Image (spheres, rainbow, N blue to C red):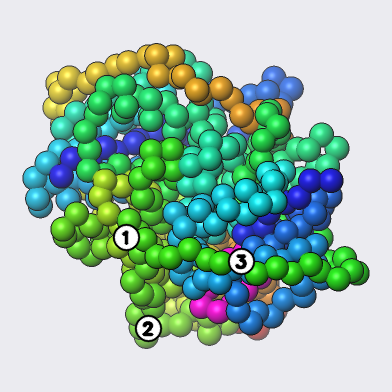
Amino acid sequence: MDILVFVKRVAATQEEELRIIDEGKNIDLSKIPFKMNDWDNYAVEEAVKIVEGRGGSVTAISIGSAASDEVLRRAIAMGAKDGILIESNETIHDPVLRAISFYNFIKKEKIQFDAIFTGVQSEDDQFAATGGFLAGKMGLPYASMVIGIDAIENGYFVLRRELEGGLQERIKIKTPCVMSIQSGINEPRYVSIMGIRKASKVERKTVKFNDYAENGDAVIDLIKWSYPEKKGKATMLTGEVDAVCKELLEILKNKGVC
Amino acid sequence: MGYALIISEVRRGVFEERNLDSIGIANLAGKDACLLIPEGNYNINSNMVDRIIKVKIEESLFLNPLIITGLITKIMDSLGLPDMVIFTHSSSGIEMASYLAGKMGLPIITDISGYEKNGDIFFKSYYSDKVFGQFRKIKDNPLILTVRSGSFKDFATDKGKQVEETTVEGLSDIEERSFVEYVEEEKTGVDITKAEFLLSLGRGIGNKDEIPKFEELAQLLKATISGSRPVVDKQWLPKERQVGTSGKTVKPKVYLAMGISGAFQHIAGMKDSECIIAVNKDPEAPIFQYAHYGIVGDANKIRDKLKDIIQGG
């Protein structure tokens, strides 16, 4: 089975404070570390696991600046056969443009595949739309929030989708298809620095985003960035750690829980 | 005035409450609200919308992205193009919305939590609510939206006029993608929804080795351990301990969140707790917007100090 996996390099902002600059036009990411999108990490692992079990290949594809090569190297270190960078100097925010570029690339280069995997969403824009848009455009069956693949048989995936409140649904989907993989579906393997170094020796292909941009005119416009409305009324406990902790224990006592 | 086509989410016979947010944004934007729903007995005030189209179809087929796209195309053929097609921002909502957008080549904005009528501007979360992008559409074609639960339900009000109801034929099942069955999560020993005091852990605690040290603190405080999605995904804690939309909704007396930044899906599962105390390194972490008490600091350091004080005293 040949699987294409889309991977994205994103800013790791969990523990970072984000600053809006240029009068709302940009976000300052200059001091923020980057990494592979968490969901894509699970998607690569799932694809590699399938191929290890039944043969075939995994190809990682990324849209982004030259720096995105690092996520391709990571995917290769995890077991992808090769990596392709669709290089764009601008950040593409609109999932429609990302999907159209993938679509044009796959069609024009006649890339063969049995399944396309994406992460459910990316940590930066949380759009959760690239996989679905691509499937619709290609006319292929689609499933998102895939939290388990139970069987692959007779040209079908039998899989589970995560719904809300602990409920899942089991569905059957015919190949070729597009699937968006949910975090937690597997335990992504550890990638060592040695592994990444070895992966660097595998040749990665780079193509230009503009060569695959036909019918990819912008349809939505990001006017500006803003901070969330402050509605917080939290009483902040400040001071020395010792004093703060004593205050916290006092609050717990008053609430009658300890 | 154009109309908004609202795709209702019904799950195991229940009209999900988050549909009210889809209706709310249609009303807020001043569109005629047209609700598409499978035929059945649901508990809804139908006067919140202008028109209801009932479809003779099973719910599992209605929620299939391939089938709903066919149904929506049929509706558009007979009613004309809407200004918006609105879905809930949920597992099935995002699946159907993105597929429809690709099939019809339409613009899409997901996870909408704010709207400004002046300028037709949609607010969308980025970076787990640390910033918001303000979007508008460029071309004059229908815009596909998914709407964040809880954002617009206050605008889903009785319009004070008789709703127009029609019934249409459904579509049959397809082999490309078909529903098999619902699968319930396994029931295990711990039920975090019953706990009075939850000590909830996020990825800010750093790594799995920290967990036993928090378990010691939980024992000293007589608290029950729970966690956020990333911590469960990384298998630092079992799934039954997960708080949030895909896990459990909890309302303890005290919710002590340590190293949790507060993604919307997490907040939705704990915001009704009686008292929320948050510890996080980032002073701008969204969780402080929902907390009653906050401490800016390293969760592990606070943990160790708390243990010292309790054991020393």
B112 in the magenta segment:
no
Q: Amino acid at mark 1?
A: Glu
Q: Is residue A88 visible?
A: no
Instruction: Single out the mark in the foreground, 3 or 1.
Output: 3
**Is the same chain shared between marks 3 and 1?**
yes
- A10 left or right of B256 in image: left
Circle 2 residue: B187
Please state which of the two labelled residues, at mark 3 or mark 2, is closer to the viewer: 3
* Prevailing secondary structure class for the magenta stretch in the rendered image: loop
Using a 10 Å C-alpha cutoff, classify the residue at mark 3 as few (fewer than 14 neighbours), some (14 to 19) or many (20 or more): some
Q: Secondary structure at mark 1?
A: loop
Q: Which residues are magenta?
A: B8-18
Is residue A204 positioned above or below B147 on the image?
above
* Residue in view at x 74 percent, y 47 percent: B114
Image coordinates for residue A247, horizontal then vertical, percent: 67, 66
**In the image shown, does A8 or A131 lie closer to the viewer?**
A131
Q: Residue at x 34, y 36 (%)?
A: A6
Q: Quadrant of residue B175?
A: bottom left
Q: Are marks 2 and 1 in contact (CB under 8 Å)?
A: no
Q: Considering the image in quadrants, where does the N terminus of chain A appear?
A: top left
Question: Disc 3 designates what residue?
Answer: B168
